[in-house]
Image (spheres, grey):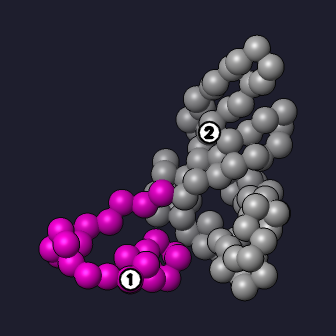
Amino acid sequence: MTYFQTQTRQSHVIIRTMTEKDIPKIGELQKIAFLTMAAKGVCWKPEQLKIHLQVFSQGQVVAEYNGKIIGSCSRLIIQLKSEYEEHTWKEACGDSFF
């Protein structure tokens, strides 16, 4: 697990690699942060986040403050046939499963 720490006088935030244990907390955070998307059911689903960890674990990170997940980021690296090849989000990320 990778940890990066940022500390100010008032706060202590840890940026670290996501674990499978974090997935339910990320789901709850997304429901709060992305109300419209959550209502449409387009936030990350637990099975998608599990695949993200399997495919590119070092690209999945969370921000933690006082033991609580306050942010997350799912990154991926793709290679297109042509640098400027037209594509959709679903094509580029395997319909959110990377």
Task: Return the residue nearer the eye: 22 or 36.
Answer: 36
Quarter of the rendering occupied by the N terminus: top right
Picture coordinates of residue 67 (x, y %)? Answer: 83, 37
Q: CA distance from mark 1 to mark 2?
A: 29 Å
Query: CB atoms at circles 1 and 2 under 8 Å apart?
Result: no
Q: Amino acid at mark 1?
A: Thr
Q: Residues within 10 Å of mark 2 (few under 14, many from 20)?
A: some
Look at the image and say whether residue 56 sits in the magenta stretch: no
Picture coordinates of residue 23 (x, y %)? Answer: 73, 60
Magenta highlight: main SS: loop
Task: Quickly name the residue at label 2.
Answer: 16
- Asked if residue 6 shows in the view, the reply is yes
Picture coordinates of residue 70 (x, y %)? Answer: 76, 46
Look at the image and say whether residue 93 sits in the magenta stretch: yes
Task: Quickly name the residue at label 1.
Answer: 88
Q: Residue at x 26, y 67 (%)?
A: 79
- Asked if residue 27 shows in the view, the reply is no
The residue range painted magenta reads 75-98
Disc 1 is placed on an element classified as: loop
